[in-house]
Image (tube, helix red, strand yellow):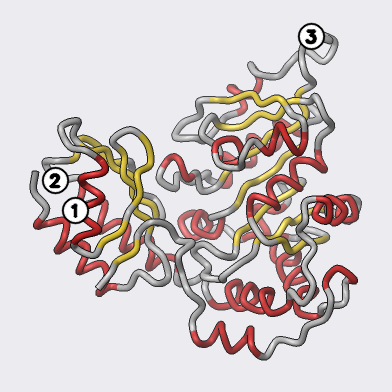
């Protein structure tokens, strides 16, 4: 048995999802006539109370489009210093939008109005880029899936918008966050100008993300998608998996969280671990003792059929997901219990 905990992106479509894909009516999405893509976009937009949605191949693309349509070159974006849009999107903020970035410390990545206030540039000073956008991430991948409460989101959004700043949300694992807080997508949607949600992580679709935005910005978003090479043709086969994911796979995320919590409790008792980040959702990140090589540790896991990834100096990350069942959990627990150094 192999328990693959490298990411929640390693999932495979279930037979039921594959059947939905196989039977999906399709057209040409670049012409706007793929009925399944149109249905997916309408479903997602209505869930969040937003006007429009744009189906794209990846969350990186939806983030980059959302940010670019809310900003102008030479402006500045405010975000957490470990944000995915800054750390893991290939320099896209600079390359695609020509933005400067103001990085904040945050509380486990959750930035506050107080931090934002002291990092807004003087618009009358030509030496400084104009601060134009605040971007949040929920959940926060660098902080083991830390979650913003709805109240925290409201405070940041109200403060920022009162100053004329736009709001973007990298919601790659937003449904994991909502599973924890108990809020609905509709409650979140009103606080952002653009939202990126991913279908191919915990929700189990093979490909795809959605950018949610306003009617005023959707044409600009589609034009930007085209310039990035994101126009797809008979994309309804993929969109059908996204519809299935949104309709069938959100409720089961609590199972991923339960299994991650069990791993968290076990790992923090191990002598070869110096610290474990709080595990609110489906991500467990822990730090190994300095005497242990991360490569050696991962190699031992792999030998026994457990896959994980290095996530920083002496850090290891494990992510539970749809294809990580109780039998995989039992196997992982057994392996972790017999590893010694």
Instruction: Identify the image quadrant of residue 127.
Output: top right
Determine whether 160 is above or below 125 in the image. Answer: below
Dot in front, 3 or 1: 1
Callout 2 touching callout 3 (CB < 8 Å): no
Camera-nearest label, 2 or 1: 1
Pick whichever of labels 2 and 1 is earlier in the sequence: 2
Disc 2 crowd, CA 10 A, few/some/many (<14, 14-19, 20+): some
How far is disc 2 from disc 1 in space, using C-alphas? Answer: 15 Å
Q: For mark 3, does the 10 Å Cα neighbourhood hold few (<14), some (14 to 19), or many (20 or more) residues?
A: few
Question: Considering the image in quadrants, where does the N terminus appear?
Answer: bottom left
Q: Is 293 left, or right, of 82 in this rendering?
A: left
Q: Is residue 326 above or below residue 82?
A: below
User: Which quadrant does the C terminus fall into?
Assistant: top left
Mark number for residue 270? 2
Q: Which mark is residue 127?
A: 3
Q: Classify mark 2: helix, strand or loop.
A: loop
Residue 288 quadrant: top left
Identify the disc placed on residue 197: none
Image check: 27 left or right of 60?
right
Q: Residue at x 68, y 59 (%)?
A: 186
- Which residue is the site of mark 1? 300
Viewer-closest of 135 and 182: 135
How busy is the neighbourhood of tag 1: few (under 14 within 10 Å), some, or many (20 plus)? some
How far apart are labels 3 and 1 at the CA level? 53 Å
In primary-sequence order, the first of circles 2 and 3 is 3
How far across and how far down the image is residue 88, in percent? 55, 41
Closer to the camera, 231 or 163?
A: 231
Q: Nearer the viewer, residue 284 or 45?
A: 284
Q: Is residue 146 above or below residue 202?
A: above
């Amino acid at each position: 048995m192999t328990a693959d905990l490298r990411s929640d992106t390693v999932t495979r479509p279930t037979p039921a999802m594959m059947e939905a894909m196989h039977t999906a009516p399709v057209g040409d999405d670049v012409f706007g006539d793929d009925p399944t893509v149109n249905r997916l976009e309408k479903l997602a937009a209505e869930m969040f109370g937003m006007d429009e949605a744009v189906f794209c191949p990846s969350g990186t693309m939806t983030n980059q489009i959302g940010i670019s349509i809310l900003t102008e070159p030479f402006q500045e974006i405010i975000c957490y210093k470990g944000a995915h849009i800054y750390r893991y999107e290939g320099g896209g903020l600079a390359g695609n939008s020509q933005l400067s970035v103001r990085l904040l410390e945050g509380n486990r990545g959750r930035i506050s109005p107080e931090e934002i206030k002291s990092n807004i540039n003087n618009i009358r000073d030509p030496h400084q880029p104009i601060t134009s956008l605040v971007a949040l991430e929920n959940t926060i991948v660098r902080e083991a899936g830390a979650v913003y409460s709805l109240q925290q989101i409201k405070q940041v959004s109200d403060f920022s918008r009162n100053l004329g700043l736009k709001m973007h949300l990298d919601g790659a694992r937003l449904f994991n966050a909502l599973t924890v807080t108990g809020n609905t997508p509709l409650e979140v949607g009103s606080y952002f100008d653009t939202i990126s949600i991913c279908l191919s992580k915990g929700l189990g679709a093979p490909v795809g993300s959605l950018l949610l935005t306003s009617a005023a910005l959707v044409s600009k978003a589609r034009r930007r998608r085209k310039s990035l090479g994101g126009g797809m043709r008979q994309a309804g086969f993929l969109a059908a998996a996204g519809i299935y994911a949104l309709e069938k796979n959100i409720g089961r995320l609590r199972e991923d969280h339960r299994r991650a919590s069990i791993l968290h409790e076990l790992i923090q008792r191990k002598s070869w671990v110096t610290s474990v980040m709080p595990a609110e959702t489906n991500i467990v990140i822990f730090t190994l003792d300095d005497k242990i090589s991360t490569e050696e540790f991962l190699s031992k896991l792999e030998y026994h059929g457990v896959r994980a990834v290095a996530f920083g100096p002496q850090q290891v990350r494990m992510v539970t997901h749809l294809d990580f069942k109780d039998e995989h959990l039992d196997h992982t627990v057994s392996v972790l219990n017999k590893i010694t150094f």
